[in-house]
Image (spheres, helix red, strand yellow):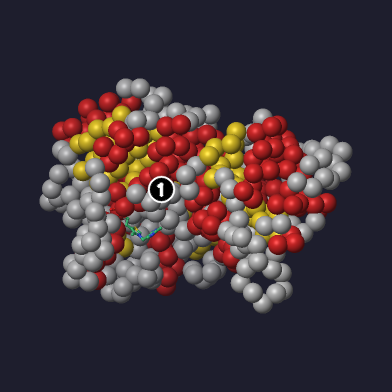
Amino acid sequence: MKVSDYIASFLYVNGIDHVFELSGGMITHILDSIHKINKTKIISMHHEQSASFAADAFGRVKGIPGVALATSGPGATNLITGIASCYFDSSPAIFITGQVNTHEQKKDRKIRQLGFQETNIIEMVRSVTKASYMITTAESIPQIFEAAFLIAIQGRPGPVIIDIPMNLQRADIIVNEVLPVKPKTDKSNIPKDIMVEIIQSIQQSKRPLILAGRGIKASFSQKLFLDFVEKTKIPVVLSLLGLDILPYENKQRVGYIGAYGNRWANHALGDCDLLIVIGSRLDIRQTGADVISFKGDKKIYHIDCESAEINNRISGCIEILADIKDFFISSKNVFAKYTFEEKLEWNERIQKQRSEWSDTNELKDIKGINPNLFIKYLSENSDQACGYVADVGNHQMWTAQSLRLKEDQVFLTSGGMGAMGFALPASIGLSMANKNKPVVIIAGDGGFQINIQEIQTIVRNNLPIKMIVLNNKCLGMIRQFQDSYFESKYQSTFWGYSAPDFEKIAIAYGVKAHTIIDESEISGAIKKMWENKDAPFLLQVMIDSHVNAYPKIAFGKPITEMEPNSKPIDMEGT
Ligand SMILES: Cc1ncc(C[n+]2csc(CCOP(=O)(O)OP(=O)(O)O)c2C)c(N)n1
């Protein structure tokens, strides 16, 4: 069997029905084989970075690896941002890069390059992959693909790269049958004692809280999580990547926490006496820089599948090292015999703060459209969407603060990598992972310009992607940073920066588009956007350049002290 035919068969046998790529000489054999076998759809994009983000989104929601391919040299290096995004946000993915023929590789020679476009991609991405393979023999390929698949999905999911020289792609190997890979079924061993201890802690606590992170979705245990939450009656705060774990209407959902978290949710996090952290790594964007006040006197149970993530920044946590799904299965059995009371006073306090500090009232005296209000209205009127993808910047924070997610709607964004340019290509992966259902993107004018070329991929594939550009004519998040720390000297964010009229750009691509400048136009614009639910649409929402993302933790202070009321005591490094 030709190696490239084996690869194509491996992909479809393992349920990978879409791959994302930009062509080049060194991957032509593989593309030709995928085309010939005709089971997996090849989605040709206009930048390998986009292909990597689409694969990230696809893998994130499907739970099997998203796959992106690129040619050697610039194709491979263009994948790197997306590879790192998968690594930091725990998305299962396999990246396949073509490499020059084995006899054209420089190997140990003290030269820079031998073959045209020869680049050592494996060395470059070692620190942002779970495993990286440079293929040296054709016979090793089946074993390496099986290993890559398992590594990508098992434990904490992440990316694997396989670099395949051109001559080995066209070699022949002996394969009797290409079979699906069987994941291992090892179970984490969680001692019953610790479960009983958690139960007692919950019963004794006056102000218990759960912090839910992406680990719950990554382990596909959302349903089990719901059972856990209902059983224990504990209110839940959500991290940025955990935003879609509970629908907005769930009565135990408190809100979004962190650097730009909902004020009432950050207060709940600051004031709780018992915190159960599940699948969240307590990074600086969640806890703020003041780790001492974050820990305070509270008891923290931290459940995660990676030991190094526990007691990392926040010390004094009680470690439960387990696969999240196993934790829920085990807790279900042990917790069944116990009853839990709702902590009425605590819940009332949270609800009171929530009504006093509503997310749509944070921005005072602004000109034009209030972005929080826009996001609220958008999400209250977009039931047709299977999910939302936010890019990176202030618009991402307004979205996280104000999105009213319905049951089963997903929310994706670039968390750990924080990569501008993520939303447009990721929406393609998300829609395709959901049988081409509608997806809403929320992007800023800066990030949208990074992968704007993918409007063409949307058009060619006739995807129902609704692109919302919150156009504040500046790189808003960094412009806000310059207001805080650089006396409003707006170099490179406002000064020396520009954005086009995105409505005109969309029309040039053949996409219907519309622009609004006033709050009175919001309702009509969203109706227009959904008039044809199956077609792409671009809505440009003009936002005043000086509108900030608030509240924001006053950097260096406790999580409960937020700008604009409180001022930072330190300069953030992120
Ligand atoms: C690829 C990349 N480059 C630079 C940054 C730094 N950065 C973070 S937010 C931001 C501004 C984003 O501007 P825009 O997309 O217009 O969104 P806004 O903040 O205005 O809502 C920048 C430059 C980044 N996160 N990613």
How many marks are shown on the rendered structure?
A: 1
Query: In which quadrant will I find the C terminus?
Result: bottom left
In this view, the residue farthest toward the bottom is 110
Query: Could you tell me if residue 379 is visible in this image?
Result: no
Quick check: 160 above or below 105?
above
Secondary structure state at the residue bearing disc 1:
loop
Q: Nearer the viewer, residue 45 or 379?
A: 45
Which class describes the residues within 10 Å of circle 1: few (<14), some (14-19), or many (20+)?
Answer: some
Amino acid carrying label 1: it is Asn
- State the residue at coordinates (61%, 45%): 67
Image-quadrant location for residue 501: top left
Looking at the picture, does residue 422 appear above or below residue 497? above
Q: Quadrant of residue 438?
A: top left
Badge 1 residue CB within 8 Å of ligand 1: no
Quadrant containing ligand 1 reads bottom left
* Residue 313 placement (x, y as % from top left): 49, 70
Please give left or right for residue 517 compared with residue 224 in the image. left
Q: Nearer the viewer, residue 333 or 26?
A: 26
Res 367 seen here: yes
Q: Quadrant of residue 405?
A: top left
**Mark 1 — residue?**
451
Q: Position of residue 235 (x, y in %)?
A: 43, 47
State whether residue 479 is above or below residue 3. below
Residue at point 75% right, 61% down?
A: 103
Q: Could you tell me residue 497's position as x and y percent?
A: 24, 58
Closer-to-camera residue (114/396): 114
Query: 531 or 568: nearer the eye?
Result: 531
Q: Residue at x 48, y 48 (%)?
A: 47
Quarter of the image for the N terminus: give it. Answer: top right
